[in-house]
Image (tube, rainbow, N blue to C red):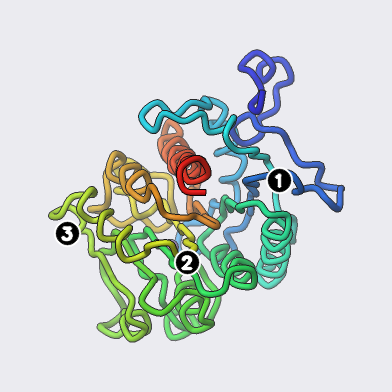
Amino acid sequence: MSQQSAFEYLRHGQAPFFRLPLCDVQAADRYHGSDVVLVGVPTDAGTTYQPGARLAPWALRRVSALVQSYHATAGIDVFQTLVCRDGGNVAFPPFDRGAMRDAVQAEVAAIVRAGAVPIVVGGDHSVALPALRAIHAAHGPVAIVHVDAHLDTSSADTWGDEFHHGTPMRHIIREGLAEAGQLYHVGIRGSWSGADDAEVTLDAGNRIFFIDEVVARGMPHLCAELRERIGRRPTYLSFDVDAIDPAFAPGTGTPVPGGLDAREALALVRGLAGVRLVGADLCEVSPALDHADLTAHLGVAVIYEALALIAMHRVHDA
Ligand SMILES: [Mn+2]
């Protein structure tokens, strides 16, 4: 079995992501033979409001034990189709953001070098920048589907700091990690510091899908446009759980009312079927702010849908 059985999981009492085998974190070739590696990044040193996202990798592992291998509507056995492993957490001093970026970039690079797709489980959204630096080194500029309430294009003007969780997309654009015109911000809403918050991304030809447009058009229509625009490009999914309405995802540090509902969030990922995912992150779950693990379960469901996309691509489009 690619997943431990429910009884094995109960017997040993440990909770790797989705009951998957753990990589031997001491081994130099720890990622070889994997199709997908999930790594946790326990950081929230880049949060601007309520912290707590550093504990998300443990919370998501715990609730992910409930997920079974067979995706009923996609008709695919995810963990039989793909060799998925839990790569453990990336280790660094939790207050040192520079060390976090270096360690995440190195770890994601090692996963990509082994021929596997990295799935980065944050942590706050600062993890996206080093992950994409490593992705870019292997794939060149990629398409990015950025699901978020916020643009994350802030500069040092706001907090006097270049590298907090509201800034990764500015760096990603400036460093050319996304192909110009291929960064899609989905679910954007709320207040900005000024009209020029969007300048850096619009100047690069990128597209903002505000929440009202998303809801008015409906997810199938929106996803058809995304698939059409992206085509066969290597694509990275950066999913900030605060894109989802706080009613469905209360456990997050910078909530914004009026977001995606749970079904829309999952339909968005499912709607990317056929897109070639080369990496993904799921960020900003803050377990201490969560209720009944709602946000953790939803975050895990988003990751599972992304895994199903990779599995389907492997079967149908390889
Ligand atoms: Mn974000």
**Dividing the image into four equal quarters, which quarter contains ligand 1?**
bottom left
Residue at 30%, 61% in the rendered image: 228
Residue at 86% from the left image edge and 48% from the top image edge? 27
251 or 60: nearer the viewer: 60
Secondary structure of the residue carrying numbered label 3:
helix
Q: Distance between the residues labelled 2 and 3?
A: 26 Å
Q: Give the residue type at disc 2.
A: Thr
Is residue 288 among what the camera can see? Answer: no
Label located before the other in sequence (1 or 3):
1
Give the answer, above or below, for where 52 lies relative to 155.
Answer: above
Callout 2: helix, strand or loop?
Answer: loop
Position in image of residue 145 (x %, y %): 40, 61
Q: Circle 2 is placed at which residue position?
A: 48
Task: Report x, y in % for residue 126.
Answer: 54, 66
Q: What element carries label 1?
A: strand
Q: In which quarter of the image is residue 222?
A: bottom left
For the residues marked 1 and 2, what is the alpha-carbon distance in whole angstroms?
A: 28 Å
